[in-house]
Amino acid sequence: MNCPCCSGKSYDECCKPFHLGQRHAPTAETLMRSRFSAFAIPNGDYLMETTLPTKRKLHNKEDLQEWGEINQWTKLEIVRAPSANEVEFRAFYIGEKGNPQLHHELSLFQKLNDRWYYVSGEFLD
């Protein structure tokens, strides 16, 4: 199976080791890709685990899981990484009513104890 993050690699050699906790994403962009894949799979546990611990109260695992389930995640496009802890991306998906959707965001990440975490995102467009 091709990895949902559009890396061109197989899921087994790309995001799966992160999802299984065998490895941690070495960069913010890699974490971004693995989180997109976690929406596509879906894997709400991984999405919560990779959210900065102090920000988890702002999210709900069940909602993250549901958003992954009700949408068909079709493509991830990394637009740019303006710094080591920022990634601008476009996530393409088919919404629950069958309409093509675009989620365009500039995400902020933080490295804590040698692990990258998602902090927040600014919606663009």
Image: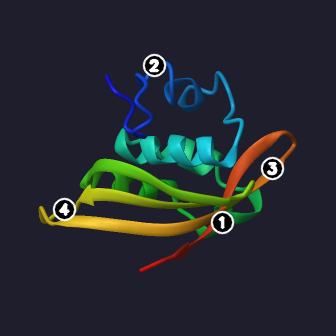
**Mark-to-mark CA distance, 4 and 2:** 28 Å
Say what amino acid the circle numbered 4 marks.
Glu
N-terminal of the pair, mark 3 or mark 1, is 1
Q: Is residue 69 above or below residue 8?
A: below
N-terminal of the pair, mark 1 or mark 4, is 1
Q: Nearer the viewer, mark 1 or mark 4?
A: 4
Residue 32's x, y, as percent? 56, 49
**Mark-to-mark CA distance, 3 and 2:** 25 Å
Say what amino acid the circle numbered 2 marks.
Asp
Residue labelled with disc 3: 111
Task: Tell me, yes or no, whether the two marked residues, 3 and 2, touch with CB atoms within 8 Å.
Answer: no
**Mark-to-mark CA distance, 1 and 4:** 26 Å
Say what amino acid the circle numbered 3 marks.
Lys
Task: Tell me, yes or no, whether the two marked residues, 4 and 2, touch with CB atoms within 8 Å.
Answer: no
Residue 101's x, y, as percent? 26, 66
Residue that appears at 39% across and 50% down:
76
User: In the image, which disc is placed on residue 57?
Assistant: 1
Q: Is residue 110 above or below residue 27?
A: below
**Mark-to-mark CA distance, 3 and 1:** 19 Å
Residue labelled with disc 4: 96
Based on the displayed image, in which of its 4 quarters is residue 27 positioned?
Answer: top right
How packed mark 4 is, by other alpha carbons closer than 10 Å (few <14, some 14-19, many 20 or more), is few
**Mark-to-mark CA distance, 3 and 4:** 34 Å
- Quadrant where the N terminus is found in the figure: top left
N-terminal of the pair, mark 1 or mark 2, is 2
Judged from the image, the secondary structure of the residue bearing numbered disc 4 is loop
